[in-house]
Amino acid sequence: MSQARQAVAAAKRIVVKVGSSSLTTAVGGLDPSRLDALVDALAARSAAGSQVVLVSSGAIAAGLAPLGIGKRPKDLATQQAAASVGQLELVHAYATSFARYSLTVGQLLLTADDVVRRSHYRNAQRTFSRLLALGVVPVVNENDTVATDEIRFGDNDRLAALVAHLVGADALVLLSDVDALYTGDPRRSDARRITEVVDESDLADVIAGTTGASGVGTGGMASKLAAARLASSAGIPVLLASSADAASALAATPAGVPSPPPAASASIAPAPATPSAGALSAVAPASADAASPLVPASSGIASGVTAASVDAASDLPAASSGTPSADVSASAGDASVPALIAGGPVSAGAPAAVGTAFAATGSRLSARRFWLAHAADSAGRLTLDDGAVTAVVTRRRSLLAAGIAGVHGDFDAGDVVDLTDLAGKVVARGVVAFDAVELPAMIGRSTHHLAPEQRREVVHADDLVPLPHPN
């Protein structure tokens, strides 16, 4: 098992994203059997000792059937109306399904504004922290009922990557209607399946598409690939898999069983003639009573989550550092929790080699630096000369007026701005200390040639983060 798969299997806090096409159809609304099968896998992972956060699409698609709408509407007002109806359907279905395992869900509806604004970002962190400490399964979705074209995430894949860092997750699992990442359309015979992504070179031949054939999603493979890159570059391993393989993708490594050494390199295999399209494989559910093999919340597995230490990278309480117990059982024949995962005992190789695993390629940023790099909106742009680019990116120094070659946009002091080189490539982002109208007169001037009130950094090093990849 590769290092990335090993990390996903051992994750104590895991974010799972599922797309609309995996839960709904354009004409039939929610598919209860698919949703229940997903919950079976999530509940099994929770019972194995992991804290689970679910990012779920499907509100708009779930609202189409009750409103008598045959396909996803294109206008924002009708999308918001469908989301208003569908969100109730979606959260009720999740609450009912998780209740079979005595698990409580909590709904969090976010807009891009909630992660763009620093105060909102911190509030979201605190909410997640408390929910997880109480043993609740947070169910997250974009707030389609109030989001506008200007503040929409555009897809829940990026939202899932942002949430994964926000909650200090150990791994991110992206579930869709395609079984893995391919170099092209998986229906084509020349497309190759990619099983491991160790670095960017493994993605050189990938051509990712957008919305799938179901017509109910918005992201497509391109957004999933972008989300996987975002998360992995911030130190979070990612597994991209089919929702039909959810049980295998979410299987946990049992306690006391060592995992095989990580794979030496990435592996690319020929694509099948057609991608996997089978129904979700369900873990046999049980009623939420004494006969249930899954431990009920009252036992302390779900409600007694340890949340004592603080993760420096996320400002959220870290998940318990202990290894999940493999011998927790309930009264029905002393059936152990791990026996439910993937329909049988968990092997040392869990999760199975399903999907595409992305290794963590970067170090984990602090919550503030991650917010600057990936969540905050840019209000403008500063062009830097070559010397300033070296100072900011390589030497991690503050940006001074002398290194600025151009000012673009209408921004205020305290806004986030992009820093670009002379060719226009974004090399960093940071919080600017001056209004846009003040800076033109300061361009290229040494600090001692400026007015006394201007003799400070334009972007301080503490408020600046280099970007390793171009936007």
Image (cartoon, helix red, strand yellow):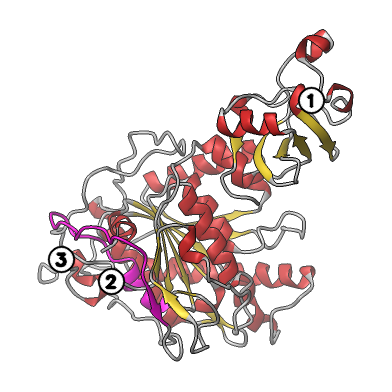
Instruction: Give the CA separation, mark 2 to mark 1.
Output: 53 Å
Q: In terms of sequence position, does the residue under pointer 2 or pointer 3 come before the other? A: 3
Residue under circle 1? Answer: 434
Tell me the quarter of the picture where residue 227 sits: bottom right
Residue 269, horizontal then vertical, whole percent? 38, 78
User: What is the three-letter code of the residue carrying label 1?
Assistant: Phe
Instruction: Give the CA separation, mark 1 to mark 3.
Output: 61 Å
Residue under circle 2? Answer: 352
Q: Nearer the viewer, residue 285 or 257?
A: 257
Residue 266 located within the stretch drawn in magenta: yes
Mark 3 residue crowding within 10 angstroms, few (<14) / some (14–19) / many (20+): many
User: What is the three-letter code of the residue carrying label 3?
Assistant: Ser
Give me the disc on residue 336: 3
Instruction: Give, as a single range, the part of the protein colored magenta.
Output: 243-270
The answer to whether 420 appears left or right of 49 in the picture is right
Instruction: Give the CA separation, mark 2 to mark 3.
Output: 20 Å
